[in-house]
Image (spheres, rainbow, N blue to C red):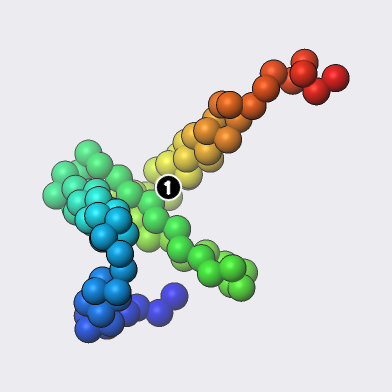
């Protein structure tokens, strides 16, 4: 994944809407917390649909921690996607 130059980043920020800017502030705040507090960890995954591989960036993580964070995230996503699902008995 190509890095954006500072001028490109600034222009991109100018072109996003207010809600996206607020979300960006939240993301930056959470990532910065990982740099200043060793108790916090971050695993970020970047991927374009046409790429076969993902790019992974981490803060305060070794390989085992990355695997644990990704496993927990996967379980959270499964829970969130099935939380409102009807009971399996309703499918019979």
- Residue 38 is situated, as x and y percent measured from the top left of the image, at 20, 44
Please, is residue 7 above or below residue 33 in the view? below
Q: Residue at x 46, y 63 (%)?
A: 46
**Residue most toward the top?**
89
With 29 as the anchor, is 44 left or right in this view?
Answer: right
Q: Residue at x 52, y 33 (%)?
A: 80
Q: Which type of secondary structure does the marked residue at label 1 adopt?
A: helix
Please, is residue 12 above or below residue 91 in the view? below
- Residue 7 is situated, as x and y percent measured from the top left of the image, at 22, 83
- Residue 4 is situated, as x and y percent measured from the top left of the image, at 32, 79
Q: Is residue 64 visible?
A: no
> Callout 1: few (<14), some (14-19), or many (20+) C-alpha neighbours within 10 Å?
many
Which corner quadrant holds the C terminus?
top right
Q: Nearer the viewer, residue 72 or 15?
A: 15
Please, is residue 64 above or below residue 79 in the view? below
Report which residue position mark 1 lands on.
66
Q: Nearer the viewer, residue 25 or 76?
A: 25
């Amino acid at each position: 994944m190509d890095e954006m130059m500072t001028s490109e980043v600034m222009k991109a920020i100018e072109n996003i809407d207010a809600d996206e800017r607020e979300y960006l502030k939240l993301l930056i705040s959470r990532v910065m917390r990982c740099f200043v507090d060793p108790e916090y960890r971050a695993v970020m995954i970047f991927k374009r649909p046409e790429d076969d591989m993902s790019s992974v960036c981490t803060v305060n993580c070794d390989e085992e921690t990355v695997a644990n964070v990704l496993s927990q995230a996967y379980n959270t996503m499964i829970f969130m996607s099935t939380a409102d699902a009807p009971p399996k008995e309703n499918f019979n």
